[in-house]
Amino acid sequence: MKVNDYEVPEGLYYTKEHEWVKLEGGNCRIGVSDYAQKSLHEVVFVDLPKVRAKIVRSQSLGSVESVKAVADVFAPISGEVTEVNAKLADTPELVNQQPYGDGWIAVIKPSNLEAELKNLLDAKSYADFLRTQVK
Amino acid sequence: MLRRTHLYDFHARKGHMIEFAGFEMPLWYEGTVPECKAVRNSVGIFDTSHMGRALVSGDDSTAFLNYITTNDVAALEVGRAHYSVMCNENGGIIDDFIVNRLAEKQYLIIPNAGNREKDLSWLRAKATQFKVEIHHVSDEVSMFAVQGPNAQKVLQEMFSEDLSTIPRFGGRNVNLDGIKATVTRTGYTGEDGFEVFTWDSPVEQPSKAVTMWNAILDHGKASHIQPCGLGARDVLRLEAGMCLYGHDITESITPLQARLGFVARLAKSEFIGRDVLAREKADGPKRVRVGLKLLEAGIPRAECDVLRDSRILGKVTSGTFSPTIGQGIAMGYVPREYSKTGERLEIKVRGKELQAEVTGFPFYDTSKYGWQRTQR
């Protein structure tokens, strides 16, 4: 679905900080939403977490940066980082071009998914939230 | 209530707007990265009318300006400009700006946008013993910057006056179908280029300014001229090693600490701050401004600590990602002992201590970028 110009694909979970979560088997692939990448504009650097890093929900696990601004990426769930998108080192603009595809940021093995899923928004709820953010 | 420049309609239509120094200004049109690339490779145009413009004229105008600024105004020829700073009694920088000598007894100075009122108050307060008139003309004269290796080519098509003979920091009056303007070979990008002042163009009746802007865009089409916003302006000046007032220079910093000693002419007649600067020159400034280039991935930002072996030496005052060299770059202040080119330091970026190196200015290779490559 779309909110104004912003894509909000179904089948993903979202946070109010504009991260998305895709459940893949037992793991969670995460990234930032179309709204986030459009707000930042030209992404020139992504600070990725380290593989095997333990992360706690709502803590910053890295950042997505434009020339003039830094946006924290907050962990949508707690767990351990099992994979990071190394392509973003050479082509950070993938976050702008394919925020839900090749611009993914990390894969996390969740430690408490069942309980924490409650904190995430489904596509429709995120879209409703987005509508309150955009003018 | 935010203020607007003559070209507000254009910016609002084409640009992504933000608030800057009380003005609604474009941060970018296409994007900071493509705009920087356009300026370094061809030509870009900036609306800089948010900056101040003050005319200082009268019998004592030279003596007055020589008293309140650090550079030598008496040595400035008519039709020439120089970069200068205005210091307080402690040698701290009140503002940095270009001083243009328009005539024997008439000067145009260009305060930073955020210092319009501060500078005018200071000028008026210090002028009481001098026979001068100070006219604030910011809202009657528009100002654009046309910068890049193709800037002269674009502007030359518009004016019959020969621009090729204007030296760096030189100026000439020009005429565009009856619209009176002055162009100076000055800028804030490190590239060759001009600043264009269009006279008699009040903000409330901006038609002359708009005509000038549109003519530049029109003649610039063949060179793919790019309107550029404040984002590109900040990155380009930082790449060129130029200071931004309020960040790299403030009232707590002297021109010697800022490595602007070349505008502090201690041998000229008495000026405000001279004694302090002379003492500092004799002792050597304790801390100095340096350029820092990151040696690993990351983007340094203002307020990041600069360290050596985890010991804090100073802070970053300006930082960004440089699209021209593909690396994080910064300016900051460190104790003089650590200011040599090649010195290895660390910058703490978001909790991580990243390796960096002290470099000279500009950050880019001057055989590939900047006005030096055209050897003017």
Image (spheres, coloured by chain):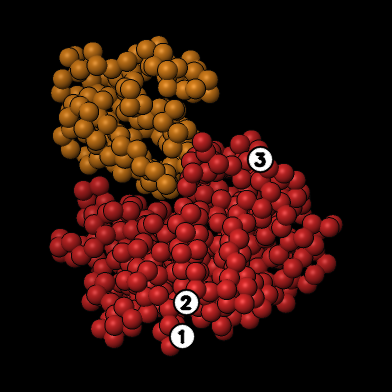
- Residue identifier under label 1: B269
Image quarter of residue B100:
bottom right
- Residue identifier under label 2: B67
Label 3 and label 2 in one chain: yes
Q: Is residue B243 above or below residue B231?
A: below
Q: Which x, y percent locates residue B222?
A: 75, 54
How far is disc 3 from disc 2 in space, using C-alphas? 40 Å
Which colour denotes chain A?
orange
Q: Residues within 10 Å of mark 1 (few under 14, many from 20)?
A: few
Q: Residue at x 15, y 60 (%)?
A: B310
Report the quarter where the C terminus of chain B lies: bottom right
Question: Hey, what amino acid is under mark 1?
Answer: Ser
Q: Is residue B238 visible?
A: no
- First of labels 1, 2 by sequence position: 2
Question: Pointers 1 and 3 in contact (CB under 8 A)?
Answer: no
How far is disc 1 from disc 2 in space, using C-alphas? 8 Å
Q: Is residue A2 above or below residue B245?
A: above
Mark 1 belongs to chain: B
Label 1 and label 2 in one chain: yes
- First of labels 1, 3 by sequence position: 3
Label 1 and label 3 in one chain: yes
Question: Hey, what amino acid is under mark 3?
Answer: Phe
Image disc number at residue B10: 3
Question: Hey, what amino acid is under mark 2?
Answer: Tyr
Q: Residue at x 46, y 68 (%)?
A: B126
Q: Which x, y percent locates residue B218?
A: 76, 50
